Amino acid sequence: MRAEVREDYVPVGIERFSASVAEKHVSCHASAHLELAIPGLQLPVEDRTIANAANKGTMMHKFMEDVSVLSPKELLGLAQAIEYIATLRKKRRFKMLVEARGTGWWLSQTPNTSADVVLYVQDEIHIVDYKFGKILVEVDDNTQLKYYGLSFFPLAPKAKGVHVHIVQPFADNMDSVYFTRDELDEFRKETAAADAAIQAGSTKFNPTEKGCLFCPANPHGRGDKATHMCPVMLSILYPPKVDEDSILDEPNN
């Protein structure tokens, strides 16, 4: 059938040829400019939400493009992390927050905090913390995880505790811990007391292995170093030399 061409046509708003529309344009030229071919036509408003299948497909293509640069081992680790999250989400019809925003509601300055994923219903809550380093992160007695648990606990008012998960694929570490309501309340009291003392001007030193790990005043810390080091840490790491001769020369009491 011969294609009809309008003499008064001005080529404006033609849908461009592409791999995805080639079949449509070859078989139906009108599909490339429907507003011209069908007078009075109103095209549908483009759905830009993630619920739209085309948009979801675009997102997945972008995700695959981004992760394709990973090594085969890293890809397998990432697949393991995705499977962990998928299995967790299948347990119940959870509400889900991604990059969830919360606060330290029990502290004087109510500082902001965020969690990678929060899944919750009235009587159950799970908080997921992604870690992509290769140094193993322990869940037991993890203060950061307790902080997350207490921050988001109000989302599940009938829950008896909080499940917090470490998803660390490149260290083969998929682990979780459960903090009871009582444990979180003890943590609340402990941190609130420390906050009150700090706000009052306390500069008490009490170095600990976990607490000092990223402190800039720690001579052996993992983070950037400050210009002056912690005097208590220095005294522990580099105690003053003792003159043994002077000790031997001291008179007996």
Image (cartoon, rainbow, N blue to C red):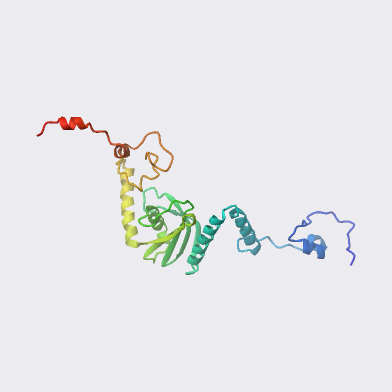
Q: Position of residue 116 (x, y in %)?
A: 48, 56
Q: Position of residue 95 (x, y in %)?
A: 49, 64
Position of 68 relative to 157 (above/below) = above
Residue at image x 78%, y 57%?
A: 17
Q: Position of residue 84 (x, y in %)?
A: 49, 63
Nearer-the-camera pick, 233 or 24: 233
Residue at image x 33%, y 55%?
A: 187
Relative placement, left or right, of 182 versus 4 is left
Nearer-the-camera pick, 234 or 180: 234
Question: The N terminus appears in which quarter of the rendering?
Answer: bottom right
- Dividing the picture into quadrants, the one containing residue 206 is top left
Residue at image x 40%, y 64%?
A: 157
Q: Position of residue 23 (x, y in %)?
A: 78, 64
Question: The C terminus appears in which quarter of the rendering?
Answer: top left
Number of numbered discs on residues: 0
Q: Residue furthest left?
A: 253
Position of 224 relative to 249 (above/below) = below
User: Can residue 149 be seen in this snapshot?
Assistant: yes
Position of 52 relative to 234 (above/below) = below
